[in-house]
Amino acid sequence: MYNHYKINLINGAKELTPFIYGDKISMECKDLEGNWKLGPICLNQKQELSVYYGRDSPLYCGIHIDEKEFNRIKDVLNRNSSWECRIPISSESDTNDNIYIPFSIQLWGYPQDDHLDITTHYNFIFHVEKGLIIGATLYPVKDKFQDVRKNTVFTIHGAIKWFNGGSHVELNDSLKLIKDNTNEFLNNLDYWIVILWIVLSMFTSLIIFSLIYKYKLKPNLIRKYLKND
């Protein structure tokens, strides 16, 4: 069952539905006409670039570069434009009601006369809190450069990582810490349950022995000594 959280906006508070572990989250980017569309489209998955909430995983996406996309990327490399994208901060069923975190795909490369030299390594980083995404970025890391030409596939790879809150503590480490603390608590609980069981067993045995002595052994002993007298 989902818990709901409220976020304060200029026009009032808005109730949000948090993500749960493993939820699929799709990103959107502006197309060449400036409209928001799902994307970029990864040819290997045959769908838009997506992540799964809280799940660290490799990033791999092959993007088809037609002539228009080639020219757009060239402008991005020349810093004449930006590749604007966004991702929802919560799991709302009505996409028109979503709040988004904006970010841009920061390409690193060098335009040449007939092609583009672009690095292929990119990391996708998320900061989350109580099931809500509170920060996102996608940035390049020095690696091999790909010769990208018109009507070819530009392949990016890297890592998708999730961090707890505004820190750089990995979300999975936080979950592991909670699990470890829970296991420690359960182990301690098991220890005290055993101690309690021993005490109760001794107490129960003492009561049973007392009852046996009072109603069985003691009367028998009294009758025995009276008989001897």
Image (cartoon, rainbow, N blue to C red):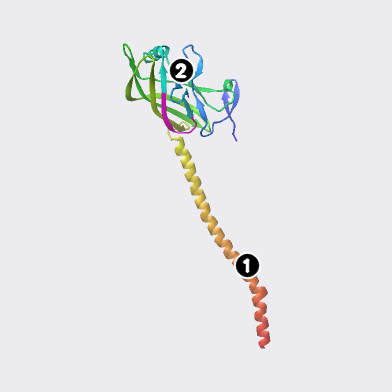
* Residue 92 included in the magenta stretch of the image: no
Q: Residue at x 49, y 47 (%)?
A: 183
Residue in front for this viewpoint, 11 or 185? 185
Residue in front for this viewpoint, 8 or 33? 33
Considering the numbered disc 2 on the image, is that residue within a helix, a strand or a loop? strand
Amino acid tagged 1: Ile
Q: Is residue 170 above or below residue 221?
A: above
Which residue, given by chain and number where applicable, does mark 2 sit on? 84
Q: Is residue 193 left or right of residue 67?
A: right
Q: Residue at x 51, y 55 (%)?
A: 191
Q: Residues within 10 Å of mark 1 (few under 14, many from 20)?
A: few
* Residue 53 included in the magenta stretch of the image: yes
Task: Give, as a single range, the part of the protein colored magenta.
Answer: 52-61
Secondary structure mostly seen in magenta is strand
Q: Is residue 51 above or below residue 176?
A: above
Q: Residue at x 65, y 80 (%)?
A: 221
Which residue, given by chain and number where applicable, does mark 1 sit on? 207
Residue in front for this viewpoint, 139 or 148? 148
Quarter the N terminus occupies: top right
Name the disc covering residue 31, or none: none
Q: Is residue 122 left or right of residue 35?
A: left
Name the mark nearer the viewer: 2 or 1: 2
Q: Position of residue 78 (x, y in %)?
A: 36, 13
Amino acid tagged 2: Glu
Rendering quarter of residue 20: top right
